[in-house]
Amino acid sequence: MPLPITIIGGYLGSGKTTLINHLLRHADGVRLAVLVNEFGELPIDADLIEAQDDDIISIAGGCVCCSYGNDLTLALLDLVKMDPQPDHVVLEASGVALPGAIAAAVGLLDGYLLDGVVVLANAETIREQAVDTYIGDTIQRQLEAADIVIINKTDLVDEDGLVSLRSWMKERNGDVEIVLAQHGQLPSSLVLQSFLARERKHQEGHQLNAFETVRMEIVTPVQVEKLAQDLASPELGLLRAKGFVKSPQGELKTIQVVGRRWAVTEAPPNSQPGLVAIGVKAVVDPKVLEKVAAAAAVKAD
Amino acid sequence: MTTIYAAKKIITMNPARPETTHVAVRDGRILGAGSLEEFSRWGDYELDEQFSDKVLMPGLVEGHAHTMEGTLWRHTYCGYFDRMDPDGKMWTGLKTIDAVLDRLKEAEAKLDDPDTPLPGWQLDPIYFNNERVSREDLDKVSSTRPVGVMHASGHILNVNTKALELAGLLKSGVNHPGVPLGKDGLPTGELKGPDIMTPVGVHVGFDRDMLACDERGLRDFGKLCVRTGVTTVTDLAARLNDEAVDMMLRVTGEKSYPARVVPLRFFHGLTPEDLVEQASSLKTKSTDRLRLGMIKVVADGSIQGFSARLRAPGYFNGAPNGLWYVAPEQLQEIYDRALEQGLHVHTHTNGDEATQLAIETLERALAKQPTPDHRFTLQHCQLADAAQFRRMGKLGMCVNLFANHHFYWGDEHYRLTVGPERAERMNACRTALANNVPMAIHSDAPITPLGPLFTAWCAVNRITASGRVQGEYEKIAVDDALYAITLGAAYTLKLDGEVGSVEAGKRADFAVLEDDPTTIGADKLKDVRVWGTVQDGRIFSAQAG
């Protein structure tokens, strides 16, 4: 089973650390391995830390945090050998790193499956940063590489400002899904597919009602890649989808969607067919999703 | 006990008595440089005449090298140019891909275990009309063991099929800008950029930490210093964990270790606060032969790798701008905290935008924390223009320009990366000096070979590998170049009070030369033969190994 890895990008002050702490706080049994560039002024909230040495912080609930310092690739090679293996890797890119380049490199590493690139933007400063002499092009390249952009700290901007910010963002990356947040408070399932998979099992709602989670029972065989591709189309407005469906040959396949990115892989043994998707409540229409699923179904001859 | 050395000529770098014939040494210090008669009042002495047909200079100072060169020599040398190893063997440069493969085959024949990896280094296909080395080529060396050859730039690695297999990369559908694919849809074996070089590099025998130098490597590096007349050398980006520091303290503390090593703590992986704290505490561990406590920051990438940050008009071939390796806010915090703690920072800037950021950042830091004589130094600083040098001069910044680079890659810069006009101004030694920017010049060994006299030749002649003079205006005089590789470099390390000239009270560090660099002719500076060194009063002959 490849280890899912989510890249969290964004410039200094966009709220990456806050978001990661939020994920750890709500990990609820999913064992996360968080990779950060450096152990700065407490990358992890003190109350979550169980033990710390030079290279690794142990966190409540079986999660860990490691610093990768100079060599991210080596850290990833080490992490995949960890026993027991974590359920999901969350990679916090440095403020000037290009998450697109990291995603391309991760895509080549044996044992990993890219779960998506999530880039945070500080609602108050992002437009200014994007035209800065020194870092403007870096910021733009970060946003262009995102599957999901989280516009964070929206409490610092008024309603009109957010509307114009959203259209500004769409001009830069027309394909991207945009999510608004304050203090990194978001359903974890939106950031990491491992949470989405779990939500499907637990059949439980989540704490923030701006988002809609849709569960679909798909038991008949489907054209798997068509379904995955359709779920990733911009009209549906899905942030993420994950599930297991039967191929026309009767094999169970995993579908993963994040924004416009989709992947089909072998399903792990004992997976149960079915699919779960999450998106912004105002946008996502369960009826449309049913139609998409029906359109991919293999017609009985 | 006082020893007085008689030499054919001693070039002192002390303008008050620039040339002399004798130097008196006691306990590793210079009592004086002058005539034999002048030393009579120092008491008993032994007259040592073994250098009476030699020319002495202050021990040369290399202000930007990496001790890992010592470690690399355990791999097979595949470079285009002749290069001497730590034991004095001259490896002939390889002029064709077949010659590279033949040398690798020779090395392969000496390995018994079929799984042992075979790493080579310093390949430079630029000189083979950019003809690439494929995995099929390297498969001819071995199909059973992983084989990999690192390029001279350090930015590209070529590997054989076995190495790709071990790294899980021998598959179709690889989609990465750093992994070119062949007609069969499989990777060709060329890997560009550290992201992708590292996971394969570990299988072909390149150490996990490329910057690290082990014990034997550090000793071998010392031998290279003796062969090139170097008595003080930097290790410009070291991780310096406890283990590494202990090893360096032990090795440099050995009775016969021939050089003073100045390792700079690499900034990456630490917050500015932790970085400054660590550097401060390292400083207290310094010994005479291991000078700790300085900081190295890398602001951008390299020009030939298109990862340097350039201002308008950008790259000549239209490549997008390069990468930042530090955020402007982080650089500011590092400078602020370092000035506050009295620490000395060297910053790698290749592109002129990175240079501009460093200048502006330091200007703000100095406004908050006025620091006379800070000597913050820009390393490489290859593309800086006249306005930037003027500003650096006013701010009291130093520069260490990459003169060797001009020879090895100048043609590439002219043709491909920045175009003729900016290629001619790269490593602008004359402009730096004209604007009173204290200047050193460097090799960045192992990127180019250690050898300050060669580096001086590069700065004086500005000849590229193809034989063209590139940037006539930026040439400097022989005397200026010799100053740059002695006192100039010592100044950027705040060691100019101890080394860099032959005068009373300074360390007895000499480069012992067979030829006189001041008379051999500017075009022959690189041909000056080095007999060895005297370091801290101890004699090291290159022949003795």
Image (spheres, coloured by chain):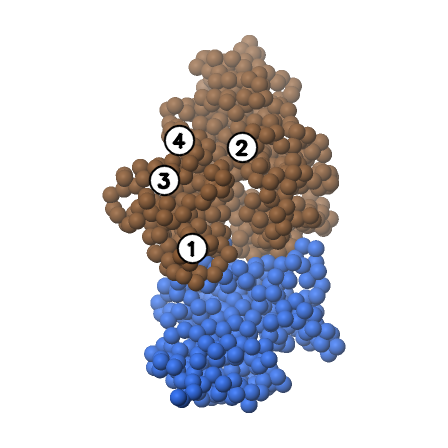
Chain colours: A blue, B brown
Residue at mark 4:
B91
| Disc number lying in front (2 or 1) | 1
Decide: is B70 above or below A213.
above
Q: Which residue is mark 3?
A: B101
Marks 3, 4 in one chain: yes
Q: Residues within 10 Å of mark 2 (few under 14, many from 20)?
A: some
Q: Nearer the viewer, residue B140 or B54?
A: B140
Seen in the picture, residue B178 relative to B381 is either above or below; the reply is below
Dot 3 or dot 1: first in sequence order is: 3
Point out residue B297 in the picture as x, y percentages from the top left corner.
57, 48
> Left or right of B353: which side holds A273?
left
Q: Of circles 4 and 2, which is in front?
A: 2
Q: Amino acid at mark 4?
A: Trp
Q: What mark, if any, has residue B465 been given in the picture?
A: 2
The residues tagged by marks 3 and 1 sit, at their Cα atoms, a distance apart of: 23 Å
Location of mark 1 (residue): B183
Q: Quadrant of residue B107?
A: top left
Give amino acid for label 2: Ala
The percent coordinates of residue B494 (x first, y second) are 60, 36
Label 2 chain ID? B
Q: Position of residue B344 (x, y in %)?
A: 60, 43
